Each structure stands twice: as C-alpha cells, then as structure tokens.
Image (cartoon, rainbow, N blue to C red):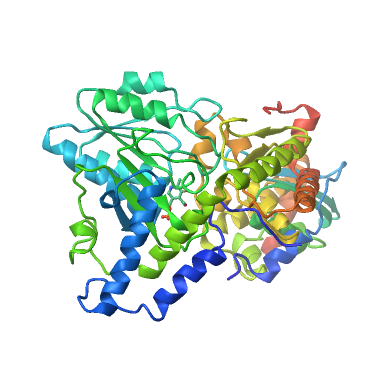
Amino acid sequence: MKIYADNAATTRMSRTAIEAMLPCLDEICGNPSSLYSEGQRAKEVIETARKEIAQIINADPKEIIFTSGGSEADNQAILSAAAIGQKSGKRHIISSAIEHHAVLHTLNKLEKLGFEITLLPVHENGMIRPDELKEAIREDTCLVTVMFANNEIGTIQPIKEIGEICRARKVLFHTDAVQAVGHLPVDVAEYHIDMLSASAHKFHGAKGVGFLYAKKGIRLSSLIEGGAQERGRRAGTENVAGIAAMAAALKESIANLDRNAARLTAIRNRLIEGLSEIPHSALNGDREKRLPSNVSFCFEGIEGESLLLLLDDKGISASSGSACTSGSLDPSHVLLAIGRVHDVAHGSLRLTPGEDTTDEEVEYIIQAVKDVVQYLRSFSPVWRDLCSGKIKHII
Amino acid sequence: MALYSDKVMDHFRHPRNVGVIEDADGVGEVGNAKCGDIMKMYLKIDDDTITDVKFETFGCGSAIASSSMATELIKGKPVSEAMTLTNKAVAEALDGLPDYKMHCSVLAEEAIRNALEDYYTRHPEKRGENAEASIED
Ligand SMILES: Cc1ncc(COP(=O)(O)O)c(C=O)c1O
C-alpha cells in the first residue's frame, strides 16, 4: 500500500492544474512583457489568473502580485511593512512564537537591523490570545504578522478578531495563509487582512509559485530588482505556466471546499480517535480549531525520525517535528511553544492525508502507527525507565 | 536520493543484538532524551572476552543503526580490542553517515566505552591486566 499523508508539506498537482499549465509550456510561448500577440497571449493568461485569484479572496486584481512561493511572499510583506514603519520611526513588530521560519527568520534579520520584535506566546492548544495582542500593540508598532493556520499542529488562529484589533489600532496586519488558502474560506475584506501570503503547491498547484495580496495603498518594496514586471514590485519574467496552474488549482479547491473539508474532517477525526488509543500519546494543537486535514501527535519514549522511516517502509509518507528530521539539534519550535518538553517533542508525528484517502487506508495508517510505536518502545531505554517508574510520564 | 546507505537501513530495519542482559558485567548509558538520542549497552564478559552484548536505543535511524553496528564490531572480541573501537570505525562499517548524523556514531563509541568502564569499576584488578596486555601487544 502507498499512502501519501504529507499534504501539509506539499500536494500532488491536480489534473486541472496540469492541464492549465500545459499550453503555457507549449503554444503560449511568448514573454508577457513583449508587445506582439504571442507575448500578449501570455500576458492575458497572467491577468486572467490574477483576476480569478483576487475574486476568490475578495480582493482587487491590482492587489495581487505573483511570487516564487510562500517564503518570498512572507519576506516581501514583512520587509515592506518594516520599510514603511521605518519612515515614521516605527520599529516594533508583533508576531507569534509558532510562525513558519520564512516569517521568523525575516524577523530575526530585522531585529539585527534594530527592530524590536515581540513574539506572542501561544497557549497549550496553539492559539494566541487576542487580549495579549491588544496589550502588545504600541505607538511604534508597524506590523502584526500572525499565521492563519499552523503547518505543524494545524491550529487556526482567530484571524478576524486579530484583523479587527489591528484595524482599530491602525497597525498593518499580515497573515501567512499558506496552509489556509484553498482549504478554508479566506476573505481579506471580512477579516481585515492587509497582506496575505499563499503558495500554490499547498493546494494542488505547482511548486515554486505563490502570491502576495497587499491592500491598495500599501507600498511594497521589491526584493528582486530588474524589469517592471508586477508593476515594479517583483522583477523577472513571470512563471506563466505556474501562475495559470495556481489559478486553476485554487478555483477547483474552492469549488470543492465544503465537500473536501467534510471528508477530511471525517478522516482526521477517525485518525485522532484511533491514535489516541496508543498509551501515553497526546494530540498537539486545538481539537476543534484545526485544519481539516491535520493530525499531530506526540508519543512518549520514541523518536520521530525512526518512526517516519518505518512508516515509509509500510508505504506511508508522513512527517515529524523531531530534531533528527530537521537537521538541527532542537525539535520543532512549534511543539516547544505549546509546552511540549524536548523529550516528548522528539517523538512527534504529523499526518496530513488528502481527501482521496480511503477508509481502508485510514485504518491501515492507524494500525501501522500503533505497531511501529510499540516496536520502537520495545527497545527504547526511555520507555523502559518510564514503565519502571524511574522517570515520570509527562503525557 | 536515499538519506542513508543500504547498510544503515539494513541495521536500522533489522537491528542486531537488541535487548537487555539482566546479569550484565558492564552497563553503559549515554545521551539524553533532550537531545533526542539515548543508548544503553549491556556487556557479558568472560575471560576478558565480550561473550555477549545487547543494546537499547531511543533515537533516530542512524542512532539505532550505529548501536547495532557497534555491538557487532565488539561481539566476541577481547576487552582490550573493544576499548579501541572508534566512532569512525562504526561509521565506516555502515558505509558512512550523513555529516549531521556523525554524532550518532560518537554516542555508540561512548556507550561501549562507558559499559567497559563500568566493568572495570566492578573489577578494578582487570584494568591493570589489560593495560599490561595492551603494552605487550
Ligand atoms: C505556513 C507556511 N508558510 C510558508 C511556507 C513556505 O512556502 P513555500 O514553500 O511556497 O516557500 C510554508 C510551506 O512550507 C508553510 O507551511
């Protein structure tokens, strides 16, 4: 059996997206900046995609710029807000402890340049508290950047409330919506979002393409200097095929959003129920306010990488926040932020199945995880010490 | 592109000498759960020879493979020879480890060294004998 259960890492392109892409690799071969008809056809593909994407998130097409993905969009949004703030002496930025590294590392860079960064803590379920945001906003705050939904533990933040607070206090609000767009309803006007990042490969588009929404009037700084593409805010000949596929993939995801969410929620709930039967396991993140496809667990007494390798042997592709899978010595900052101690955070597993996962596959996954956890515990000195009472169980 | 060599995967999937020796002559434990790797080695020693060895490991694929390989490298060997086991020998026997996983082979070396130290602590008289033996070598 082959089961891909790592859709939060990336998704397989949909047929519709591939078909939208193909003509752009073939007959629509012009450069969108060229004035002859071949070029203008390519330009039209891009502008149609822009209109479609804008409409889906309730924005104006002029407010969408295409990027190389979520990371670039995050970088550009944050650096632009910092440049705007800098002009009026505002050098304070608020974010959360569980952001993606595309956000956190950009904030680190700004900190070195003299910006002050406040990272709001998350509570054990992975949610920030709007009251704590209110308290953190200062006269010199130039940006609040809080992710829409977390990639590791799936928690969905109270985006509308955050947006309202920021609007009332006249502070720019950016959200990394890479895990949300295509999976949850996103309306930038209703949620008072000033800037939003998205990435096509998370909703069955191609890797290496995404977009940044920036509300009219926000002056974006260009990360890449060169030609006048994207109205001077992102130089470089556009990824025409990727952009066409992104719009097609997003349209399709939105058309099926309710049906997919219902199916995924059923799969997710069954996985959570099944894996909760494993002794000394714990679900990470909020039980209700979580992405329809996200299942994240910690298992005591085992390490995540060996769990993933053995699941791979059983045909299951999954992911973990263990240090060994990240190439660093610390386990995931997200798991640490929700209060998991190192020992427990190393034994984490993230399953993000797709809507086409069958009931039979779900049961297979549950059994496989149970077997592998039990096997690894059978020769884990940590598990032995936990069982003998030498060390205390944490979960 | 595979993360690990076939040897590593073989020892990870089918670890040799897994388990516990209840009446071990030397036990060594290194690492901590905070860093994500703990290895525990149990030795049975007769006549200055490692007659049996078992391990328990909490850790990633390469930690489990390194433990397994290290036990294979010392099983049946004289104590003096086991004392000279290096992490490099463990890594080489596994056809190499990724750079950021080399510390797993270091842990395996240290776990064995600790277990042997434990043996010497229990039998201080043996330390001298072996030191002489190694000089004679
Ligand atoms: C929340 C979040 N932000 C940003 C990114 C980066 O997106 P991309 O891979 O398109 O650069 C990802 C994906 O890895 C993500 O999950």
Is B133 placed above or below A126 here? below
When asked about the image quadrant of residue A390, the answer is: top right
Q: Quadrant of the N terminus of chain B?
A: bottom right
Residue A128 position, x and y percent, is: 45, 27
In the image, A183: left or right of A265? left
In the image, A267: left or right of A136? right
Q: Of A231 and A324, which appears nearest the observer? A: A231
Is A18 placed above or below A190 here? below
Q: Of B114 and A39, which appears nearest the observer? A: A39
Q: Of B44 and A135, which appears nearest the observer? A: A135
Residue A367 position, x and y percent, is: 80, 47
Residue beneath the point at 34% across and 26% down: A164
Residue beneath the point at 55% across and 29% down: A339
Count all numbered tags in the image, as a single digit. Answer: 0
Residue B23 position, x and y percent, is: 87, 42
Residue A286 shows up from this direction: yes
Residue beneath the point at 32% across and 22% down: A136
Q: Of B126 and A373, which appears nearest the observer? A: A373
Residue B71 position, x and y percent, is: 76, 58
Residue B80 shows up from this direction: no
Q: Quadrant of the C terminus of chain B?
A: bottom right
